[in-house]
Image (tube, helix red, strand yellow):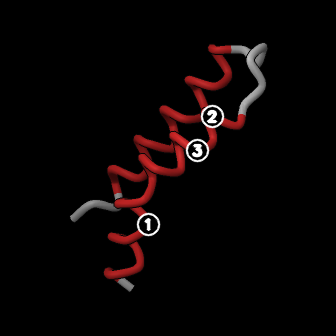
Amino acid sequence: MLHILQELSASVDQVIERVTEQLPEDFPQEIQATILDGLKARSARLTF
């Protein structure tokens, strides 16, 4: 289980980058930042 959580945490930056590239140009920056910053913060909790 620990291995899975570490793998998930390690891949978050790549996922954020891919999602950011796929968002429409006019996607609200505030919403994007809130969602992606929250994802990054939660993934940091997975790091042991």
Rendering coords of residue 7 (x, y %): 38, 71
Disc 1 to disc 2, how far (Cα)? 20 Å
Q: Which mark is residue 18?
A: 3
Residue reaching furthest to the left: 48
Disc 3 to disc 2, how far (Cα)? 5 Å
- Residue at 78%, 13% (x, y): give it: 26
Rendering coords of residue 4 (x, y %): 41, 79
Rendering coords of residue 11 (x, y %): 42, 59
Characterize the local packing of mark 2: few (<14), some (14-19) or many (20 or more) Cα atoms within 10 angstroms: few
Pick whichever of labels 1 and 2 is earlier in the sequence. 1
Q: Which mark is residue 8?
A: 1
Cβ–Cβ below 8 Å for labels 1 and 2?
no
Cβ–Cβ below 8 Å for labels 3 and 2?
yes
- The image quadrant of residue 46 is bottom left
Pick whichever of labels 3 and 1 is earlier in the sequence. 1
Rendering coords of residue 8 (x, y %): 44, 66
Image quadrant occupied by the C terminus? bottom left
- Residue at 53%, 50% (x, y): give it: 15
What is the three-letter code of the residue carrying label 3?
Arg
Q: Is residue 24 above or below residue 13?
A: above
Between circles 3 and 1, the one closer to the viewer is: 3
Q: Is residue 10 left or right of residue 34?
A: left
What is the three-letter code of the residue carrying label 1?
Leu
Disc 3 to disc 1, how far (Cα)? 15 Å
Residue tagged 2: 21
